[in-house]
Image (cartoon, rainbow, N blue to C red):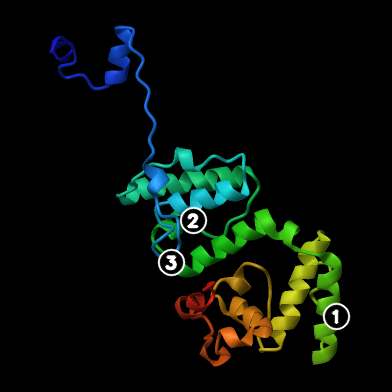
Amino acid sequence: MELAQHFSGEGNIIKHLALFQYELRHADESLSRFDFKISNLATDLRDGIRLSKLVDTWDRGSNLLSAMKYPAITRADMCMNMKAIFRYLKSNEMAFICRPEDIVDGHREKTLAFLWSLAFHYRIYDMVNSEELKQETQDIASRTGQTLADETLHQFDNQNTQLLLDWCRVVCAIYGLRIVNFRRSFADGQAFCYLIHHYRPELMNVKDVRSSNDYQNTAYVKVN
């Protein structure tokens, strides 16, 4: 009761307690019960919580999740979280083709392109076996009568990046889709569908893939 009189109208109770030599510590464990599963690209990444967890998983030094405002209920809260993620990624030399607001507003095409850029930035060099990929690309080109002596040469200085682009081009060319780059050409999900269908045709009906239909195509690009 005596302490209550001293704290009347107090805004920062922790600061006030320090004047009385009391040190108050607490731990917010609300995120420990958070469901990080992603079911819908248009809604599940908007507040930045799941996205920050993804970055933390791939980049052990980021610690972005602890910097997120949670719960992020208002659009302003979501934008604040997303801008913090973008600032960190920009400081790590990641390039963007969208704005934080695009993710917050649930723009599927730009969200998918952003996720591809994120995966490419952090994981691509761990996933690519250059010799196997080069041989696979040559085999597909040979079987389908394609040639690699075109714009696929010398677009990237990094060998693995160039090999991956060559592979995507020869596979998607089978379906009549021309791959220009890793951003614009993958934004609507069509290229992803063709890459999956080429190796696992039982997973989808290629006739259902539609040009520039990011909503429908993205629905196919998931792991069941």
Cα distance between the residues tagged 1 and 2: 37 Å
> Which amino acid, mark 2?
Arg
Cα distance between the residues tagged 3 and 1: 36 Å
Specify few, some or many for label 1: CA neighbours under 10 Å numbering under 14, 14-19, or 20 or more. Answer: some
Image depth: mark 1 or mark 2 in front: 1
> Which amino acid, mark 1?
Gln
Q: Which residue is drawn at 66% across and 47% down?
A: 93
Visible residue check, residue 155: no
The mark found on residue 138 in the picture is 1
For the N terminus, the quadrant is top left
Q: Which residue is denoted by mark 3 in the rendering?
A: 39
Q: Residue at x 56, y 43 (%)?
A: 88
Image depth: mark 2 or mark 3 in front: 3
Residue that sits furthest to the top in the current view: 20
Tell me the SS state at disc 3.
loop
Residue 140 pos. (x, y %): 80, 84
Sooner in the amino-acid sequence: mark 1 or mark 2: 2
Q: Quadrant of residue 177?
A: bottom right
Q: Taking 73 as reference, is 5 left or right?
A: left
Q: Taking 93 as reference, is 101 left or right?
A: left
> Which amino acid, mark 3?
Ser
Q: Residue at x 48, y 43 (%)?
A: 65
- In this view, the residue in front, 37 or 155, is 37
- Badge count: 3
Q: Do the residues labelled 1 and 2 touch (CB within 8 Å)?
A: no
Q: Which residue is denoted by mark 2 in the rendering?
A: 99
Sooner in the amino-acid sequence: mark 2 or mark 3: 3
Residue 222 pos. (x, y %): 53, 72
The mark found on residue 11 in the picture is none
